[in-house]
Amino acid sequence: MPINQYCLSLINTWRGTEQQRWTKTSTILQLLVSIQGLVLNSRPYFNEPAFAPFKNTKNSKRSNRYNENAFILSCTTMQKIINRPPQNFEGFVVEHFRQRAAPLIQAIDRYHQGRVVAGELGMTSPSSSAPNVAVSANFKIGLERIRGQLEQALASRSIPVPAKPIAAATTAESEKKDEHRKKGLLGRISSFLRNKIRKKKQVKSSAIGFRV
Protein backbone atom coordinates (compact mmCIF):
# COMPACT_ATOMS: atom_id res chain seq x y z
CA MET A 1 0.00 0.00 0.00
CA PRO A 2 1.53 3.37 -0.98
CA ILE A 3 2.60 5.53 1.95
CA ASN A 4 0.51 8.48 0.77
CA GLN A 5 -2.58 6.42 1.53
CA TYR A 6 -1.90 6.92 5.23
CA CYS A 7 -3.68 10.25 5.51
CA LEU A 8 -6.22 11.92 7.77
CA SER A 9 -8.44 12.30 4.72
CA LEU A 10 -9.54 8.75 5.54
CA ILE A 11 -11.76 10.24 8.25
CA ASN A 12 -12.87 13.13 6.05
CA THR A 13 -10.78 15.86 7.67
CA TRP A 14 -9.55 16.93 4.22
CA ARG A 15 -10.84 16.41 0.71
CA GLY A 16 -7.62 14.62 -0.33
CA THR A 17 -7.04 12.69 -3.51
CA GLU A 18 -9.01 9.63 -4.49
CA GLN A 19 -6.22 7.42 -3.12
CA GLN A 20 -6.24 9.29 0.21
CA ARG A 21 -9.98 9.08 0.84
CA TRP A 22 -11.83 6.07 2.21
CA THR A 23 -12.54 3.58 -0.58
CA LYS A 24 -13.74 0.01 -0.91
CA THR A 25 -10.15 -1.17 -0.59
CA SER A 26 -9.40 0.80 2.59
CA THR A 27 -8.90 -1.12 5.84
CA ILE A 28 -9.31 -0.52 9.56
CA LEU A 29 -5.57 -1.13 9.93
CA GLN A 30 -4.89 1.71 7.50
CA LEU A 31 -7.18 3.99 9.52
CA LEU A 32 -5.58 3.05 12.87
CA VAL A 33 -2.05 3.55 11.52
CA SER A 34 -3.07 6.97 10.18
CA ILE A 35 -4.46 8.00 13.58
CA GLN A 36 -1.45 6.61 15.42
CA GLY A 37 1.11 8.33 13.23
CA LEU A 38 -0.65 11.58 12.31
CA VAL A 39 -2.89 12.36 15.28
CA LEU A 40 -1.27 10.84 18.37
CA ASN A 41 1.79 13.08 18.36
CA SER A 42 2.75 16.50 19.72
CA ARG A 43 2.05 18.44 16.50
CA PRO A 44 -1.00 16.99 14.68
CA TYR A 45 -1.85 20.46 13.30
CA PHE A 46 0.97 20.23 10.74
CA ASN A 47 -0.08 16.80 9.51
CA GLU A 48 -3.03 18.23 7.62
CA PRO A 49 -1.98 18.79 3.98
CA ALA A 50 -2.94 22.48 4.08
CA PHE A 51 -0.70 23.20 7.09
CA ALA A 52 2.26 20.89 6.44
CA PRO A 53 4.32 23.62 4.65
CA PHE A 54 4.19 25.81 7.77
CA LYS A 55 5.90 23.35 10.09
CA ASN A 56 8.67 24.92 12.23
CA THR A 57 7.52 28.45 11.40
CA LYS A 58 5.77 31.22 13.34
CA ASN A 59 2.59 29.20 12.89
CA SER A 60 3.69 27.12 15.89
CA LYS A 61 1.41 29.40 17.91
CA ARG A 62 -1.53 28.18 15.87
CA SER A 63 -0.41 24.62 16.51
CA ASN A 64 -0.36 25.30 20.26
CA ARG A 65 -3.87 26.75 20.17
CA TYR A 66 -4.99 23.74 18.13
CA ASN A 67 -3.56 21.40 20.80
CA GLU A 68 -5.21 23.38 23.57
CA ASN A 69 -8.62 23.19 21.91
CA ALA A 70 -8.17 19.47 21.19
CA PHE A 71 -7.31 18.77 24.82
CA ILE A 72 -10.33 20.65 26.15
CA LEU A 73 -12.62 18.88 23.66
CA SER A 74 -11.14 15.50 24.61
CA CYS A 75 -11.73 16.21 28.31
CA THR A 76 -15.29 17.34 27.56
CA THR A 77 -15.94 14.08 25.71
CA MET A 78 -14.58 12.10 28.68
CA GLN A 79 -16.78 14.04 31.08
CA LYS A 80 -19.87 13.24 28.99
CA ILE A 81 -18.93 9.56 28.76
CA ILE A 82 -18.56 9.37 32.55
CA ASN A 83 -21.98 10.97 33.01
CA ARG A 84 -23.65 8.81 30.37
CA PRO A 85 -21.63 5.65 29.62
CA PRO A 86 -22.63 3.58 26.57
CA GLN A 87 -25.20 0.97 27.44
CA ASN A 88 -23.68 -2.28 28.80
CA PHE A 89 -20.28 -0.56 29.19
CA GLU A 90 -21.00 1.23 32.48
CA GLY A 91 -18.68 -0.98 34.53
CA PHE A 92 -15.89 -0.71 31.97
CA VAL A 93 -16.10 3.10 31.89
CA VAL A 94 -16.12 3.44 35.69
CA GLU A 95 -13.14 1.09 36.12
CA HIS A 96 -11.20 2.83 33.34
CA PHE A 97 -11.57 6.25 34.93
CA ARG A 98 -10.95 4.85 38.40
CA GLN A 99 -7.49 3.93 37.10
CA ARG A 100 -6.90 6.99 34.91
CA ALA A 101 -8.62 9.84 36.79
CA ALA A 102 -5.51 10.89 38.74
CA PRO A 103 -3.18 11.19 35.68
CA LEU A 104 -5.92 13.04 33.79
CA ILE A 105 -6.48 15.61 36.54
CA GLN A 106 -2.72 15.97 37.06
CA ALA A 107 -2.30 16.66 33.33
CA ILE A 108 -4.91 19.42 33.56
CA ASP A 109 -3.07 20.94 36.52
CA ARG A 110 0.34 20.77 34.79
CA TYR A 111 -1.01 22.48 31.68
CA HIS A 112 -2.72 25.12 33.84
CA GLN A 113 0.54 25.81 35.71
CA GLY A 114 2.46 26.20 32.45
CA ARG A 115 4.80 23.32 33.28
CA VAL A 116 4.47 21.70 29.86
CA VAL A 117 3.32 22.66 26.35
CA ALA A 118 -0.17 21.41 25.49
CA GLY A 119 0.14 18.14 23.60
CA GLU A 120 3.66 17.36 24.79
CA LEU A 121 2.98 15.80 28.18
CA GLY A 122 5.06 12.63 28.28
CA MET A 123 6.73 13.39 24.95
CA THR A 124 10.51 13.53 24.52
CA SER A 125 10.50 17.00 22.95
CA PRO A 126 12.86 19.48 24.70
CA SER A 127 9.98 21.88 25.30
CA SER A 128 8.29 19.20 27.44
CA SER A 129 10.58 20.12 30.31
CA ALA A 130 10.30 23.88 29.86
CA PRO A 131 9.95 25.52 33.32
CA ASN A 132 7.64 28.32 32.20
CA VAL A 133 5.28 27.81 29.28
CA ALA A 134 3.01 30.62 28.07
CA VAL A 135 -0.59 29.55 28.70
CA SER A 136 -3.32 31.45 26.87
CA ALA A 137 -6.07 33.01 29.00
CA ASN A 138 -8.77 31.05 27.15
CA PHE A 139 -6.93 27.77 27.77
CA LYS A 140 -6.65 28.51 31.49
CA ILE A 141 -10.36 29.30 31.70
CA GLY A 142 -11.19 26.14 29.77
CA LEU A 143 -8.98 24.01 32.04
CA GLU A 144 -10.57 25.44 35.19
CA ARG A 145 -14.05 24.80 33.80
CA ILE A 146 -13.42 21.25 32.62
CA ARG A 147 -11.59 20.33 35.84
CA GLY A 148 -14.67 21.29 37.85
CA GLN A 149 -16.97 19.36 35.50
CA LEU A 150 -14.75 16.27 35.63
CA GLU A 151 -14.61 16.46 39.42
CA GLN A 152 -18.41 16.42 39.59
CA ALA A 153 -18.70 13.60 37.04
CA LEU A 154 -16.08 11.46 38.81
CA ALA A 155 -17.61 12.14 42.22
CA SER A 156 -20.98 10.90 40.92
CA ARG A 157 -19.24 7.55 40.28
CA SER A 158 -17.44 7.60 43.65
CA ILE A 159 -14.08 8.02 41.92
CA PRO A 160 -11.54 10.00 44.01
CA VAL A 161 -9.92 13.11 42.52
CA PRO A 162 -6.49 14.57 43.43
CA ALA A 163 -6.65 17.75 45.50
CA LYS A 164 -6.29 20.94 43.50
CA PRO A 165 -2.76 22.33 43.96
CA ILE A 166 -1.84 25.95 44.38
CA ALA A 167 -0.97 27.15 40.87
CA ALA A 168 2.78 27.38 40.41
CA ALA A 169 2.38 30.70 38.62
CA THR A 170 0.40 32.13 41.55
CA THR A 171 3.04 30.99 44.02
CA ALA A 172 5.81 32.53 41.94
CA GLU A 173 3.91 35.79 41.68
CA SER A 174 3.36 35.86 45.46
CA GLU A 175 7.04 35.24 46.11
CA LYS A 176 7.95 38.00 43.68
CA LYS A 177 5.58 40.44 45.38
CA ASP A 178 7.00 39.50 48.80
CA GLU A 179 10.50 40.15 47.50
CA HIS A 180 9.46 43.57 46.18
CA ARG A 181 7.80 44.41 49.50
CA LYS A 182 10.95 43.42 51.41
CA LYS A 183 13.14 45.47 49.12
CA GLY A 184 10.78 48.42 49.48
CA LEU A 185 10.79 48.15 53.27
CA LEU A 186 14.58 47.86 53.41
CA GLY A 187 14.87 50.83 51.09
CA ARG A 188 12.63 52.96 53.33
CA ILE A 189 14.55 51.94 56.46
CA SER A 190 17.87 52.69 54.75
CA SER A 191 16.59 56.09 53.60
CA PHE A 192 15.30 56.86 57.10
CA LEU A 193 18.67 56.02 58.69
CA ARG A 194 20.57 58.07 56.12
CA ASN A 195 18.36 61.07 56.85
CA LYS A 196 18.86 60.65 60.60
CA ILE A 197 22.66 60.45 60.21
CA ARG A 198 22.66 63.47 57.90
CA LYS A 199 20.59 65.53 60.36
CA LYS A 200 22.88 64.55 63.25
CA LYS A 201 25.91 65.65 61.22
CA GLN A 202 24.20 68.93 60.40
CA VAL A 203 23.37 69.55 64.08
CA LYS A 204 26.92 68.65 65.11
CA SER A 205 28.39 70.95 62.44
CA SER A 206 26.11 73.79 63.57
CA ALA A 207 27.14 73.27 67.22
CA ILE A 208 30.84 73.37 66.30
CA GLY A 209 30.34 76.52 64.24
CA PHE A 210 28.47 78.16 67.10
CA ARG A 211 31.25 77.39 69.62
CA VAL A 212 33.88 78.86 67.26
Image (cartoon, rainbow, N blue to C red):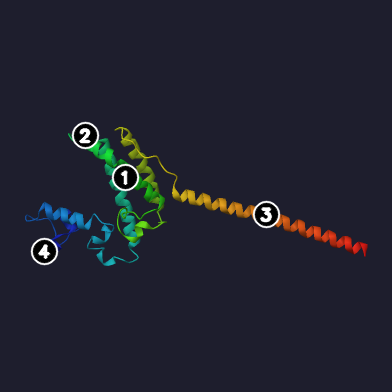
- What is the three-letter code of the residue carrying label 2? Gly
Q: Quadrant of the C terminus?
A: bottom right
Label ID, residue 91: 2
- In the rendered structure, are the residues bearing label 1 and label 4 in contact, judged by CB atoms less than 8 Å apart? no
Q: Residues within 10 Å of mark 1 (few under 14, many from 20)?
A: few
Give SS at disc 2: helix
CA distance separating discs 2 and 1: 20 Å
Q: Which residue is mark 4?
A: 2
Label 3 environment density (alpha carbons within 10 Å; few <14, some 14–19, many ≥20): few
Of 152 and 110, the residue lying toward us: 110
Q: Position of residue 66 (x, y in %)?
A: 31, 55
Q: Nearer the viewer, residue 155 or 55?
A: 155
Sequence-wise, the earlier of marks 2 and 3 is 2
Q: Nearer the viewer, mark 2 or mark 1?
A: 1
- Does dot 3 land on a helix, a strand or a loop? helix
Tell me the tag on residue 103: 1
Quadrant where the N terminus is found in the figure = bottom left
Mark 2 and mark 4 residues within 8 Å of each other at the beta carbon: no
Lower sequence index among marks 3 and 4: 4
Image side of residue 204 versus residue 134, left or right: right
The residue mark sitting in front, 2 or 4, is 2
Q: Position of residue 86 (x, y in %)?
A: 20, 37
Q: How far across and down, in percent of the image, does residue 187 sit?
A: 65, 56
Q: Amino acid at mark 4?
A: Pro
- Counting from the top left corner in percent of width and height, residue 200 is at 80, 58
Q: Secondary structure at mark 4?
A: loop
- Amino acid tagged 1: Pro
Give the distance between the C-alpha atoms of the residues marked 1 and 4, in whole angstroms.
38 Å
- What residue sits right under mark 3 in the picture? 188
* Mark 1 or mark 4, whichever is nearer to me: 1
Q: Earlier in the sequence, mark 1 or mark 3?
A: 1
Q: CA distance from mark 2 to mark 4?
A: 41 Å
